[in-house]
Amino acid sequence: MEEVSWPGKIMKFLLTVFICSVLDGQCFTNKDYPKTFDSHYDCMRAGLSESYEVLIADGNFTEEQINKLQLYPKFICQPVKEEGKITT
């Protein structure tokens, strides 16, 4: 089951990855989000992968910053209904 749909409606999922701090309870995202996916599964897989990329792999934060600010990743896959469209 790849997508949830209703007559004339198609379900999409918007991924937003946040980097949060335990110290002040704030979360921030960047200009790359939200991103659209056709299924919750695809959105969730991307959220897991991109959370790691943003926090660790891309070099946005040093180990010292992560420890000092107690940073952690968080993501959400928000379902949205998209009107069905006919393309000719």
Image (cartoon, rainbow, N blue to C red):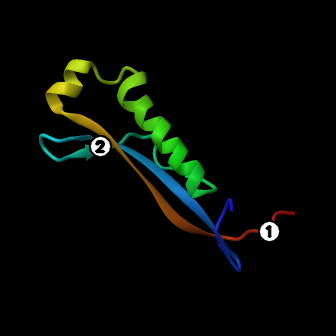
Q: Is residue 70 left or right of residue 51?
A: left
Please give the name of the residue rendered at 66% of the width and 72% of the height, measured from the top-left corner. Answer: 5
The amino acid sitting under disc 1 is Ile
Between 59 and 2, the one lying in front of the other is 2
Please tell me how crowded label 1 is: few (under 14), some (14-19), or many (20+) other residues with Cα within 10 Å. few
Relative image position of residue 44 (x, y in whole percent): 51, 49
In the rendered view of the protein, which quadrant contains the N terminus? bottom right
Direction front: furthest residue = 1
Residue 32 in view, yes or no: no
- Circle nearer the N terminus (2, 1): 2
Q: In which image quadrant can residue 4 be found? A: bottom right
Alpha carbon separation for disc pair 2 and 1? 37 Å
The amino acid sitting under disc 2 is Phe
Residue highlighted by disc 1: 86
Question: Which of the numbered marks, if any, corresponds to residue 56?
Answer: none
Please give the name of the residue rendered at 53% of the width and 42% of the height, measured from the top-left corner. Answer: 46
Label 1 secondary element = loop
Q: In which image quadrant can residue 45 be found? A: top right
Residue highlighted by disc 2: 28
Q: Nearer the viewer, mark 2 or mark 1?
A: 2
Residue 10 in view, yes or no: yes
Label 2 secondary element = strand
Relative image position of residue 2 (x, y in whole percent): 68, 59
